[in-house]
Amino acid sequence: MKKIIIAIDGFSSCGKSTMAKDLAREIGYIYIDSGAMYRAVTLHCLEQGLFEGDALDTERLRADLPGLDISFRLNPETGRPQTCLNGRLVENDIRTMTVSSKVSPVAALDFVREAMVRLQQQMGRQKGIVMDGRDIGTTVFPQAELKIFVTASPEIRARRRFDELQAKGEPGSYEEILHNVEERDRIDMTRAVSPLRKAADAIELDNSHMTIPEQKQWLLEQFRRVAAQE
Ligand code: DC
């Protein structure tokens, strides 16, 4: 069977990556979390003192960017990819509230997006890839054979992220997380470069009231339907 490209876009914290990861493992495809790449750039900015309060030194970031090596390494125990920045495993460091609250302005910079999109397109050259993000079906792989656009209400998404952080023992109140979710939606949808929007040929999935196994089953059916036509 010919390999295809699967693009999964949607709002933050709506379970895209769980669905995408599970599908990739099930069908033997590579999974790439494009949001993790923007988070890794943000972590670099924080660690190197490129932020002064909310102000980012974009010129320093522009100079640093070509030297940043962002890659993924499979966790041998879970079989899931983990994000590396300059060879260092940063999977946990990029998921903190500090990174979450600074990532949207970094992801809105045109030169950051150009560099990340180029890298993402290289990763998809051989097809057989599931990539999730905000602009995968619109900008990164407009030719993707299967495009999904996932939505869920902001309250449900904030609750899911709150539960996730709690389980990891990370700090963060529900109100703070809800505010962060809404603020990121606003920035992601209104930015000038590659704003979050559904591709005309994407299939929409509102998973507010679906369980993870239900979503998984639904996605697998979409894959089988499209792959059978290839
Ligand atoms: O999916 P996530 O929450 O880990 O994404 C982190 C941030 O990166 C989020 O604010 C949106 C941005 N992002 C983006 O602009 N384009 C992508 N393809 C993926 C993520």
Image (tube, helix red, strand yellow):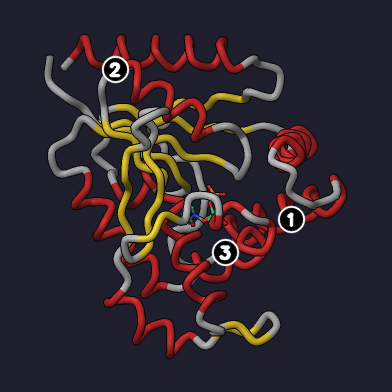
Q: Residue at x 39, y 33 (%)?
A: 80
The label on residue 103 is: 3
Q: SS at mark 3?
A: helix
Residue 133 is situated, as x and y percent measured from the top left of the image, at 45, 45
Tell me the residue that label 1 is attached to: 180
Q: Is mark 1 within 8 Å of ligand 1?
A: no
Q: Is residue 66 above or below residue 96?
A: below
Asked if residue 195 is positioned above or below residue 115 in the image, the reply reads above
As measured in the structure, the alpha-carbon distance from the residue carrying label 3 to the one carrying label 2 is 31 Å
Q: How far apart in space, not on screen, are marks 3 and 1 (Cα)?
A: 11 Å
| Amino acid at the residue labelled 1 | Asn
In the image, is residue 205 above or below residue 51?
A: above
What count of labels does the image hold?
3
State if disc 1 and disc 2 touch (CB < 8 Å).
Answer: no
Left or right for 4, reference 88: left
Taking depth in this image into account, of 48 and 204 the one nearest to the observer is: 48
The answer to which image quadrant residue 155 occupies is: top right
Q: Which residue is mark 2?
A: 27
Q: Nearer the viewer, mark 2 or mark 1?
A: 2
Which secondary structure, mark 1? helix
| Mark 3 CB lies closer than 8 A to ligand 1 | yes
Q: Position of residue 37 (x, y in %)?
A: 41, 57
Do labels 3 and 2 touch, CB within 8 Å?
Answer: no
